[in-house]
Amino acid sequence: MQTYVKTKINDFNEIVNNRRSIKHYDPTVKISREEMSEIIAQATTAPSSINMQPWRFVVIDSEQGKQTLAPLASFNLDKVMSSSAVIAVFGDRQNIEYAEEIYGKAVELGYMPEEVKDMQLGMFKPLYENASDEAMKDIIMLDAGLVSMQLMLVARAHGYDTNPIGGYDKEQIAEAFGLDKARYLPVMLITIGKAANEGFPSYRLPVDTITEWK
Protein backbone atom coordinates (compact mmCIF):
# COMPACT_ATOMS: atom_id res chain seq x y z
CA MET A 1 0.00 0.00 0.00
CA GLN A 2 1.21 3.50 -0.78
CA THR A 3 0.57 6.54 1.35
CA TYR A 4 -1.50 9.02 -0.60
CA VAL A 5 0.07 12.48 -0.45
CA LYS A 6 -2.06 15.38 -1.61
CA THR A 7 -1.97 19.09 -0.94
CA LYS A 8 -4.59 20.08 1.61
CA ILE A 9 -7.52 22.12 0.37
CA ASN A 10 -7.89 25.51 2.04
CA ASP A 11 -10.75 26.90 -0.05
CA PHE A 12 -13.93 26.39 1.99
CA ASN A 13 -16.23 26.95 -1.01
CA GLU A 14 -14.36 24.26 -2.94
CA ILE A 15 -14.58 21.88 0.02
CA VAL A 16 -18.33 22.33 0.44
CA ASN A 17 -19.53 22.78 -3.13
CA ASN A 18 -17.46 20.00 -4.68
CA ARG A 19 -17.98 17.36 -2.02
CA ARG A 20 -19.38 14.14 -3.53
CA SER A 21 -20.54 10.86 -2.06
CA ILE A 22 -17.94 8.54 -3.56
CA LYS A 23 -18.84 4.98 -4.50
CA HIS A 24 -15.47 3.75 -5.77
CA TYR A 25 -12.06 4.37 -4.19
CA ASP A 26 -8.49 3.63 -5.16
CA PRO A 27 -7.85 0.51 -3.05
CA THR A 28 -4.07 0.99 -3.17
CA VAL A 29 -4.22 4.18 -1.09
CA LYS A 30 -3.76 3.96 2.67
CA ILE A 31 -4.36 6.77 5.15
CA SER A 32 -1.87 6.69 8.01
CA ARG A 33 -3.30 6.33 11.49
CA GLU A 34 -1.50 9.52 12.43
CA GLU A 35 -3.37 11.49 9.77
CA MET A 36 -6.65 9.73 10.55
CA SER A 37 -6.23 10.74 14.19
CA GLU A 38 -5.69 14.33 13.06
CA ILE A 39 -8.86 14.22 10.94
CA ILE A 40 -10.90 12.85 13.84
CA ALA A 41 -9.45 15.40 16.26
CA GLN A 42 -10.42 18.25 13.95
CA ALA A 43 -13.88 16.76 13.41
CA THR A 44 -14.52 16.62 17.14
CA THR A 45 -14.38 20.39 17.42
CA ALA A 46 -18.03 20.12 16.34
CA PRO A 47 -20.59 21.32 18.89
CA SER A 48 -22.49 18.93 21.14
CA SER A 49 -25.17 19.24 23.79
CA ILE A 50 -23.56 20.58 27.01
CA ASN A 51 -20.24 19.60 25.39
CA MET A 52 -20.67 15.93 26.31
CA GLN A 53 -19.20 14.79 22.98
CA PRO A 54 -21.17 11.51 22.88
CA TRP A 55 -19.61 10.40 19.59
CA ARG A 56 -17.37 7.33 19.51
CA PHE A 57 -15.46 6.02 16.49
CA VAL A 58 -14.25 2.63 15.32
CA VAL A 59 -11.79 3.06 12.45
CA ILE A 60 -11.83 -0.08 10.34
CA ASP A 61 -8.67 0.05 8.24
CA SER A 62 -7.24 -3.47 8.41
CA GLU A 63 -8.05 -6.37 6.13
CA GLN A 64 -9.31 -8.34 9.12
CA GLY A 65 -11.53 -5.47 10.19
CA LYS A 66 -13.02 -5.12 6.73
CA GLN A 67 -13.68 -8.85 6.55
CA THR A 68 -15.57 -8.54 9.84
CA LEU A 69 -17.59 -5.65 8.41
CA ALA A 70 -18.21 -7.20 4.99
CA PRO A 71 -21.21 -9.40 5.89
CA LEU A 72 -22.83 -6.44 7.65
CA ALA A 73 -22.32 -3.94 4.83
CA SER A 74 -25.16 -5.11 2.57
CA PHE A 75 -25.25 -3.47 -0.88
CA ASN A 76 -22.52 -1.01 0.16
CA LEU A 77 -19.85 -3.70 0.06
CA ASP A 78 -17.90 -2.32 -2.92
CA LYS A 79 -17.29 1.12 -1.44
CA VAL A 80 -16.51 -0.39 1.96
CA MET A 81 -13.90 -2.78 0.64
CA SER A 82 -12.17 -0.34 -1.76
CA SER A 83 -11.96 2.55 0.73
CA SER A 84 -8.85 3.33 2.73
CA ALA A 85 -10.93 2.96 5.88
CA VAL A 86 -14.45 2.86 7.18
CA ILE A 87 -15.26 4.97 10.22
CA ALA A 88 -18.12 3.49 12.22
CA VAL A 89 -19.75 6.29 14.20
CA PHE A 90 -21.47 5.36 17.45
CA GLY A 91 -23.16 7.34 20.19
CA ASP A 92 -22.37 6.59 23.83
CA ARG A 93 -25.60 6.43 25.84
CA GLN A 94 -23.54 6.82 29.03
CA ASN A 95 -21.58 9.83 27.83
CA ILE A 96 -22.29 11.69 31.08
CA GLU A 97 -19.61 9.50 32.68
CA TYR A 98 -17.07 11.83 31.05
CA ALA A 99 -18.60 15.00 32.51
CA GLU A 100 -16.04 15.38 35.30
CA GLU A 101 -13.14 14.90 32.90
CA ILE A 102 -14.52 17.35 30.32
CA TYR A 103 -15.50 20.08 32.74
CA GLY A 104 -12.55 19.49 35.06
CA LYS A 105 -10.13 19.90 32.17
CA ALA A 106 -11.97 23.06 31.11
CA VAL A 107 -11.29 24.50 34.57
CA GLU A 108 -7.66 23.38 34.45
CA LEU A 109 -7.18 25.07 31.07
CA GLY A 110 -8.78 28.28 32.24
CA TYR A 111 -11.87 27.95 30.04
CA MET A 112 -14.24 28.31 32.99
CA PRO A 113 -14.04 28.91 36.75
CA GLU A 114 -14.61 26.09 39.21
CA GLU A 115 -17.91 27.54 40.41
CA VAL A 116 -19.33 27.54 36.88
CA LYS A 117 -18.31 23.92 36.45
CA ASP A 118 -20.01 22.96 39.71
CA MET A 119 -23.17 24.88 38.83
CA GLN A 120 -23.46 23.40 35.34
CA LEU A 121 -22.75 19.83 36.37
CA GLY A 122 -25.19 20.20 39.25
CA MET A 123 -27.89 21.05 36.73
CA PHE A 124 -27.00 18.77 33.82
CA LYS A 125 -25.77 15.54 35.39
CA PRO A 126 -29.10 14.59 36.98
CA LEU A 127 -30.92 15.33 33.72
CA TYR A 128 -28.58 13.14 31.70
CA GLU A 129 -28.37 10.37 34.28
CA ASN A 130 -32.16 10.12 34.42
CA ALA A 131 -32.90 10.71 30.73
CA SER A 132 -35.08 8.15 28.99
CA ASP A 133 -33.50 6.00 26.30
CA GLU A 134 -35.51 7.85 23.66
CA ALA A 135 -34.45 11.27 24.94
CA MET A 136 -30.79 10.24 25.04
CA LYS A 137 -31.05 8.78 21.54
CA ASP A 138 -32.36 12.13 20.25
CA ILE A 139 -29.41 13.95 21.82
CA ILE A 140 -26.88 11.44 20.50
CA MET A 141 -28.22 11.39 16.95
CA LEU A 142 -28.14 15.18 16.69
CA ASP A 143 -24.62 15.47 18.09
CA ALA A 144 -23.28 12.54 16.08
CA GLY A 145 -24.77 13.99 12.91
CA LEU A 146 -22.90 17.24 13.51
CA VAL A 147 -19.55 15.54 14.06
CA SER A 148 -20.08 13.21 11.09
CA MET A 149 -20.69 16.05 8.65
CA GLN A 150 -17.71 17.93 10.03
CA LEU A 151 -15.57 14.80 9.67
CA MET A 152 -16.49 14.54 5.99
CA LEU A 153 -15.55 18.16 5.37
CA VAL A 154 -12.29 17.82 7.29
CA ALA A 155 -11.47 14.70 5.27
CA ARG A 156 -11.98 16.66 2.08
CA ALA A 157 -9.72 19.42 3.36
CA HIS A 158 -7.07 16.70 3.80
CA GLY A 159 -7.51 15.67 0.17
CA TYR A 160 -9.78 12.65 0.67
CA ASP A 161 -13.38 11.88 -0.18
CA THR A 162 -16.11 10.16 1.77
CA ASN A 163 -19.54 8.56 1.69
CA PRO A 164 -21.98 8.39 4.60
CA ILE A 165 -23.75 5.02 4.80
CA GLY A 166 -26.91 4.10 6.64
CA GLY A 167 -27.46 0.74 4.93
CA TYR A 168 -25.77 -1.84 7.16
CA ASP A 169 -26.67 -4.27 9.94
CA LYS A 170 -27.13 -1.96 12.91
CA GLU A 171 -28.22 -4.83 15.16
CA GLN A 172 -24.90 -6.64 14.84
CA ILE A 173 -22.22 -4.01 14.28
CA ALA A 174 -21.49 -3.01 17.89
CA GLU A 175 -20.92 -6.59 19.04
CA ALA A 176 -19.00 -7.42 15.86
CA PHE A 177 -16.37 -4.90 16.92
CA GLY A 178 -16.38 -5.68 20.63
CA LEU A 179 -18.70 -2.92 21.85
CA ASP A 180 -21.58 -3.18 24.29
CA LYS A 181 -24.66 -2.83 22.07
CA ALA A 182 -26.75 -1.69 25.04
CA ARG A 183 -24.42 1.27 25.51
CA TYR A 184 -23.22 2.17 22.02
CA LEU A 185 -25.80 3.29 19.48
CA PRO A 186 -24.81 2.88 15.81
CA VAL A 187 -25.21 6.11 13.86
CA MET A 188 -23.59 5.63 10.44
CA LEU A 189 -20.61 4.32 8.55
CA ILE A 190 -18.36 6.78 6.71
CA THR A 191 -16.08 5.45 4.00
CA ILE A 192 -12.96 7.51 3.36
CA GLY A 193 -10.18 7.34 0.81
CA LYS A 194 -8.91 8.59 -2.53
CA ALA A 195 -11.78 8.73 -5.01
CA ALA A 196 -11.32 6.53 -8.07
CA ASN A 197 -13.51 8.99 -9.98
CA GLU A 198 -14.98 12.41 -9.34
CA GLY A 199 -18.40 11.14 -8.37
CA PHE A 200 -21.63 12.63 -9.60
CA PRO A 201 -23.20 16.00 -8.85
CA SER A 202 -26.75 15.88 -7.54
CA TYR A 203 -29.69 18.25 -7.72
CA ARG A 204 -30.55 20.32 -4.66
CA LEU A 205 -33.93 21.89 -4.09
CA PRO A 206 -33.84 25.68 -4.35
CA VAL A 207 -33.82 27.80 -1.21
CA ASP A 208 -37.30 29.15 -1.97
CA THR A 209 -38.71 25.61 -1.90
CA ILE A 210 -37.23 24.63 1.46
CA THR A 211 -37.26 27.93 3.32
CA GLU A 212 -39.95 30.17 4.79
CA TRP A 213 -39.31 33.71 5.91
CA LYS A 214 -41.35 35.08 8.80
Image: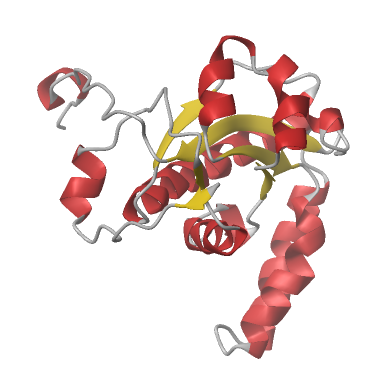
Does residue 29 appear to the left or right of 33 in the view shown?
Answer: left
77 lies above or below 122? above
> By what rule are the colours in the image chosen?
secondary structure
Evaluate whether residue 67 shows in this view: yes
- Going 42% across and 52% down the picture, which residue do you hit? 4
How many callouts does the rendering have?
0
Nearer to the camera, 201 or 212: 201
Extreme top residue here? 75
3 lies above or below 18? below
Q: Quadrant of residue 24?
A: top left
- Where is residue 15? Give x, y as percent: 25, 47
- Where is residue 164? Give x, y as percent: 48, 29
- Going 30% across and 31% down the picture, which residue do you hit? 20
Does residue 157 appear to the left or right of 37 in the view shown?
Answer: left
Does residue 166 appear to the left or right of 96 in the view shown?
Answer: left
- Where is residue 176? Give x, y as percent: 84, 29
- Going 43% across and 31% down the picture, which residue do you hit? 25
Evaluate whether residue 122 shows in this view: no
Nearer to the camera, 25 or 39: 25
- Where is residue 104? Give x, y as percent: 72, 79
- Going 76% across and 72% down the picture, which residue do you hit? 101
Extreme front residue here? 1
51 lies above or below 93? below
Q: Quadrant of the C terminus?
A: top left
Nearer to the camera, 149 or 130: 149
Q: Quadrant of residue 188?
A: top right
